[in-house]
Image: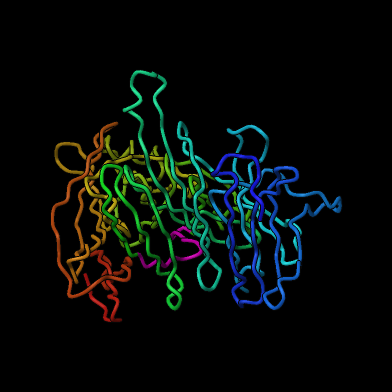
Amino acid sequence: LPSASVVADEASVCMCWRPDGTAVAISAVDVSDNTRRIRTYSREDLSLVSIGRSEDGSGKTVPNLLAPAGIAWSGLGCSQMITAVQRKGKRADTPRLVVFFEPNGLRHKEFKLRPDAGWEETVVGLCWSCQSDLLAVTLHCTKGNDDDEDKAASTVRSKVQLWHRSNYHWYCKYELRYDGAFVTMVNFDEERTHDLAVAMRSELSSEILVGEYGFAWDTSTVSPDGTAASIDGFLLNFTPFRQALVPPPMYFATITMNAPVVGLSAVPLCAENTGGISWVVQLSDGSICLLGNRRQLEDTLAGKANANDGASPSAAPAVLARIELEKARTMRQFLILSAALVDNGEFVVRCIAVESANSRQDTECIVEIDVTINGECSSANVVARLPTEGKILRIANWSDTQRLSGALVELNDGSLLEY
């Protein structure tokens, strides 16, 4: 392929195979007009099968395709689409789109990436799971300093976002965030479809580190009062079934968080006197948020009797507290067990979570956390760690009594423990 007269990064050639091995796709810049095009060729004789074009019937080439992300070919789980990244306009600061090409070359559907405010983000990788129900999007992010004399203050970050399609809508279901590091490779396991390996190197070192993750989630979470919640990146979408039956991907109400949501659970019925708190949310930046009815919480802190009585379910709960917890990024699956108003007027919420194991550990712990709310001030402290006999698959609220709230713990080997 003749090289085009553009900078090296923009002129790079990318290729990927169709999962069944019958065709190959190549993304390259044509020397004639310096325009990037995606062509597919037959494996048998390398005959041209298709060229990426607009789906509006004009036959125009899709403009502004970006090279650093490369291309990826999905399997039957996503209609064998070729995936690429496109800049929405000619300006460098316009939004980035993840776009899809059908096997016949027509561009069909897309979703827009949602960058963090104040950061410049570049998509550097696309990777499909073996069942093509998850798309991993890797981004390198930089945050420069406006002062030319202090360029050393620039910050770098890498992110791996997991996107899932349901009801013809793409949801950002999870984000892995690595401050001060560059992700060099992302790859799904060929047999365990939701197992992911991420290789990265530090900004200050050439040492390569590899993280291994196993993912599982529910499509939505429904609270005891019948409110369904669904995660979509920065957005938490709510639909109270008692008030409205709104089919997804639409929703009744939504709230925007400060960072992408990576965990969500509802407060169970067995947790009494929760002061209006109805949800616990974990964000990708490591912070924990408690959501619920603000008026109920204020009444509880004021010591009013029956503060939890007569409350109607709220379509979009308010953020009642946002807590920075040390090493929260190593924890997952936060649950609320109980809450109580103590003598000094503070409201204490007891939570538990799973503390992830490192590469030298074969077991994981259940962590007990007390979240203290006192007016506008909130804090959290780890009060205990309870080791288990293996690695934990998931935990869920459960109680066999009406007064004591607990949890069931499922290990990777299938055994169940009662907390």
- Figure quadrant of residue 335: bottom left
Residue 206 coordinates in the image, percent (x, y): 28, 49
Residue 232 coordinates in the image, percent (x, y): 52, 52
Which residue sits at x=15%, y=37%? Answer: 344
Residue 219 colored in magenta in the image: yes
Give the side of residue 132 with respect to residue 189, left or right: right
Which residue sits at x=61%, y=35%? Answer: 94
Which stretch did the figure color magenta? 213-225
Camera-side residue: 324 or 170? 170
Most extreme residue toward the front, as rendered?
2
Q: What main secondary structure does the magenta stretch of the protein show?
A: loop
- Figure quadrant of residue 246: bottom right
Q: Report how many numbered discs are placed on residues in the image.
A: 0
Which residue sits at x=21%, y=45%? Answer: 326
Res. 171 in view? yes
Camera-side residue: 311 or 24? 24
- The quadrant the C terminus occupies is bottom left
Which residue sits at x=17%, y=75%? Answer: 389
Most extreme residue toward the right, as rendered?
58
- The quadrant the N terminus occupies is bottom right
Residue 298 coordinates in the image, percent (x, y): 33, 36
On screen, 95 above or below 135? above
Res. 308 in view? no
Residue 282 colored in magenta in the image: no
Residue 38 coordinates in the image, percent (x, y): 69, 57
Camera-side residue: 116 or 372? 116
